[in-house]
Image: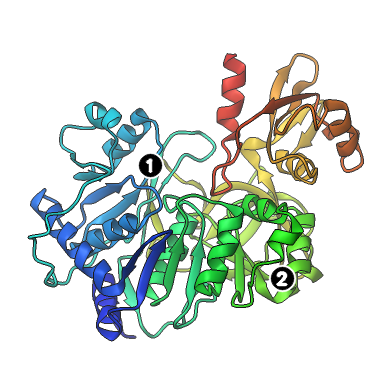
Amino acid sequence: MELMSFPARLESLALEDADRLAVTCLDSSLTRRQLQSAATRLGRTLQGLGVGVGDYVTVSLPNSTDWFVAYVACWMIGAVPQPTSAKLPPRELAAIVELARSKVVIGAPDSAVDLLPPTAKILPLDYQTDPSLSDAPLPDATSPAWKAPTSGGSTGRPKLIVSGDPAVYDLDLPLPLELRQGGALMMPGPLYHNGPAVWACQALLAGNHVVLLPRFDAESTLASIEAYHCDVAYMVPTMMKRILRLDDSLRLGFDLSSLRAVWHLAEPCPVWLKQAWIDWLGASRIFELYAGTEAQAVTTITGDEWLKHRGSVGRVTTGEMKICDDEGIDLPAGEEGEVWMRSEREAPTYQYLGAEAKTLDGGWESLGDVGWFDADGYLYLGDRAADMILSGGANIYPAEVEHALNEHPDVHSCAVIGLPNDDRGNDIHAIVEADEAVVERHDLLSFLAERLAAYKLPRSVEYVEHPLRDDAGKVRRSVLRTERLVI
């Protein structure tokens, strides 16, 4: 086993080919050597602000080459990068910084300055490091945790999920995630979310060229794959749907022959959508992964496997999973219950700050997902138990209704929640991003009636003009419900 710190790994890549592109975001690119130089100067700046090994640094930057400079700078001095959305409300950002006890916040907006803890130093969004600072290599250091992303979960309260892995690279392990030497990753997702950050950082450490977008755009994603000959791409189903909805003359005009693997994850993928991508690109190029940021266990499935197990998210490849009823009793194949996970490692895969895990005896943990295994060991997911809607004595999972809504060609995004009803307990309420003049309520319900049982049909439909999922495919149904209850 040959181990080296992340900084040492990136330095070795720069020595190997200094001029190879490391990161590109639109018109901004950094070679391996330029990334090392910029990160070293920022690392010295952070040290001057009192950041040391094991300290947290909140990175509140949009997708950009600067995001990577900040991450690598943290690794160089042994600090823990703690990413957040650059669009967070100031109070939410302040709560996260306080939870992390971050020594420095990179990218804090002016509106948040007065709310941040006085112990946190601030580097503004447009901060430029002092060019006179030396970019000579810093003493080797290893971050005790290579990342500490945030998650609001179903409660909406922020928590940190601190990785149990130090910033150490194992040269003897095969490259993960279908990455290959000399490859290029297309990353259209927001890097403050765990999935995009994991794919992008692993690709960087593997010596790949990481191609970013400031924010997801369907046409730009395909154009970037063609322009930079990307061989691996990261998607969420929301992105997949928007790409599929491009005019065929545009979508099919891009050269995607370099593309070997399209990964999708982070939200349930409707069967019709996945089938459409398989029909377009071929089953051998479609991959899916299911796991939490906590990484206790993982399932993966190839497109060819999926065709034999339609709707599945795959078999367990890392750790262990089982299905239990409400009493924590194991359920056999074919019976739906709560998904429980257990790591096979001796060391924990993560640590929570600001939350506690839901556990069973024996080291089992749950993220609140519902699902079942088939006889061949393939996992199928329902929805988060916390999001389930009880209406008239029936359990209704929002994801199923949302999948049916998303099949409508004029529905751009949607979210389904339960609203109180004195008689039935809850009514199904659909929030739809669509033009009401084009997608009338009656026609929409008729469309759904061909796909869903009558008791699953929405009792009310609300039209909005803004996307209901972010670029990572995430939606906070609990927040949407609370907003409507307040109204």
Residue at 42% in and 82% down = 173
Q: In this view, does 247 lie to the left or right of 216?
A: right
Q: What element carries label 2?
A: helix
Q: Which residue is drawn at 77% across and 36% down?
A: 395
Residue holding disc 1: 86
Q: Report x, y in % for residue 438.
A: 80, 32
Q: Residues within 10 Å of mark 2 (few under 14, many from 20)?
A: some
Q: In this view, does 198 lie to the left or right of 133?
A: right
Q: Of 144 and 209, which appears nearest the observer? A: 209
Under mark 2, the amino acid is: Leu
At x 80%, y 15%, the residue is 423
Residue 60 at what x, y percent from top left?
Answer: 33, 45
Q: How far from the left and from the top, in percent, is residue 355?
A: 41, 40
For residue 176, side relative to residue 30 (left or right): right
Disc 1 is placed on an element classified as loop
402 vs 481: above or below:
below
Q: Which mark is residue 379?
A: none
Residue under label 2: 281
Q: Taking 260 as reference, is 200 above or below it? A: above
Number of numbered markers: 2
Q: Distance between the residues labelled 1 and 2?
A: 34 Å
